[in-house]
Image (tube, rainbow, N blue to C red):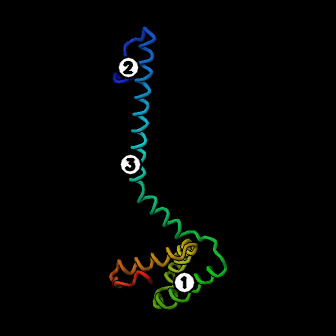
Amino acid sequence: MCAKYMTKQITTYKELLAEKARLHALLAEQKLQIKEDWQGIKEDLKPSFLIVSTVKKLFTRKASGIIGGVGLTLLADGLIKRVLLAGAGKFTKWVVPFFVKNYASHLTEEPHKLIDKIKHFFKKNGKMHHEAGMDAV
């Protein structure tokens, strides 16, 4: 046992109450320290959780309605496979649409998120310039 937590032998009721109060204060201090440490751990692991979440979305498909499923299939097979990957190999033509369909299926529940991600992608690459009045679009 650490010397910080040890006290002299208790001989009176008043000393017992004082020790009880000291221990309650120590307990509150340790709970606060654990809470702060836990918050720090969560912040440190946040990037890892985001990576794992994204990888999970790439390998799993979320069940969506018929319209959403058909739309994703048309997008992945029509646009990506036949247009963007026209000169690519068979493996690439299979893998890329697979990942696109899976990832996009998680975004169909909230279409505005999909649109925001597309806008962010083009802004990051410098292909889309922000203009005044485009916020309403």
Mark 2, residue position: 6
How far apart marks 2 and 3 lie (CA) works out to 29 Å
Q: Tell me the crowding category of disc 3: few under 14, some 14 to 19, or many 20 or more residues within 10 angstroms, Cα based.
A: few
Mark 3, residue position: 40
Q: Earlier in the sequence, mark 1 or mark 3?
A: 3
Q: In which quarter of the view is residue 23 placed?
A: top left
Eye-nearest disc, 1 or 3: 3
Report the number of numbered marks: 3
Assess whether mark 3 and mark 1 are in contact (beta carbons under 8 angstroms): no
Instruction: Give the percent coordinates (x, y) of residue 62.
Output: 60, 70
Q: Earlier in the sequence, mark 2 or mark 1?
A: 2
Name the amino acid, label 1: Ala
Question: Helix or strand or loop: what does disc 3 sit on?
Answer: helix
Instruction: Give the percent coordinates (x, y) of residue 80.
Output: 50, 86
Question: Helix or strand or loop: what does disc 2 sit on?
Answer: loop
How far apart marks 2 and 1 lie (CA) works out to 68 Å
Instruction: Give the percent coordinates (x, y) of residue 111.
Output: 54, 76
Q: Which mark is residue 76?
A: 1
Task: Write the residue at 63% across / 83% down.
Answer: 70
Instruction: Give the percent coordinates (x, y) of residue 31.
Output: 44, 36
Q: Quadrant of the N terminus?
A: top left
Assess whether mark 1 and mark 2 are in contact (beta carbons under 8 angstroms): no
* 116 shown above or below 29: below
Q: Tell me the crowding category of disc 1: few under 14, some 14 to 19, or many 20 or more residues within 10 angstroms, Cα based.
A: many
How far apart marks 1 and 3 lie (CA) works out to 40 Å
Towards the viewer: 51 or 96: 51
